[in-house]
Amino acid sequence: MDHKMLIECIGYLGSLLVLASMLMTSVFKLRVINTIGSLIFTVYALIIHSYPTALMNACLVLINLRFLWKMKKMEKDFALAECAPGDSFVRFFIDEHREDIRTCFPGISLDLVDATKAYLICCEGKPVGVTAGEQSGTVLNLLLDYTIPAYRDFSVGKYLIAQLKDQGFTKLCYGGPVEHHLPYLQKLGYVKNGELYERGL
């Protein structure tokens, strides 16, 4: 690969990442990927001496970093609402997000017939997640732990763990699909034990 083609590849990579960021449903991921793409495109613009393009992309990097910092520092106003597993609003929320839930958890059953506990997690009054499970003493066996895309920055999971601990639970167990759920489980401290992922509270 010659020098000129390598420079062009840098430009294409930056452009591709900026375009890909526009497909993100999570605002946090959008900002992160856009920052990386804009930074790469800034380097490309400087190499080809396109200074207006470099300036614009450098400004985008700074803007994204500012918003990412604010998102990290901002305390979200979460609230936990305990509901019956068959509650009509729980069912409505699941039905509204059924397609995304099935994408996140391939093959999952949404009947929740074994669930004895269900919670809606709200942010400033807006439902952003649902958790349902079967209680066994102080252990909650999770059947569903879903958060809408815009709030998948682990903050909902951290809040939920703290709240369930306050309710007297000592352990969370999850044995459902992990194809797309594993990074979340690992980030929140779940440890694999046989066929289950467990998290002490």
Image: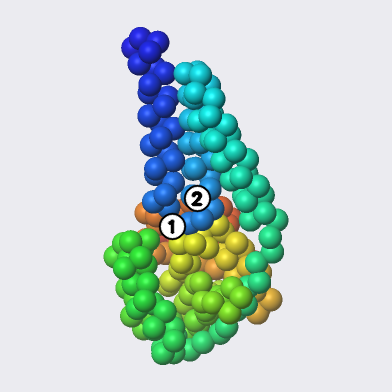
Residue extending furthest toward the top: 2
Q: Is residue 39 above or below residue 189?
A: above
Any mark on residue 42, and which?
Answer: none
Colouring of the image: rainbow
Which SS class for mark 1?
loop
Q: Is residue 28 visible?
A: yes
The kind of residue on which mark 2 rests is Lys
Confirm or deny contact between disc 1 and disc 2 (CB under 8 A): yes
Q: Residue furthest front?
A: 52
How crowded pointer 2 is (Cα within 10 Å; few <14, some 14-19, many 20+) is rated as some
Q: Depth check: 28 or 64 in front? A: 64
Could you say where residue 35 lies in the image, as x and y percent from the top left? 54, 40
Residue drawn at (42%, 24%) of the image: 10
Indicate the quadrant where residue 8 lies.
Answer: top left
As rendered, which of 180 and 122 lies closer to the eye? 122
- Residue drawn at the location 57% of the way across and 83% of the way down: 81
Residue located beneath label 1 in the image? 25
Inspect this view and state whether residue 164 appears.
no
- Horizontal and vertical percent position of residue 115: 43, 81
Question: How far across and down, in percent of the image, does residue 77 sit?
Answer: 66, 71
For the N terminus, the quadrant is top left
Q: Is residue 153 above or below residue 140?
A: above
Which quarter of the picture shows residue 155? bottom right
- Which residue is located at x 37 percent, y 61 percent? 104
| Residue underneath mark 2 | 29
In front: 113, or 89? Answer: 89
The span from disc 1 to disc 2 (Cα, nearest Å) is: 8 Å
How many residues crowd mark 1 within 10 Å: few (<14), some (14–19), many (20+)?
some
Residue at image coords 36%, 76%: 96
Indicate the secondary structure of the residue bearing disc 2. Answer: helix
Task: Locate residue 159, reporting x and y percent.
Answer: 63, 68
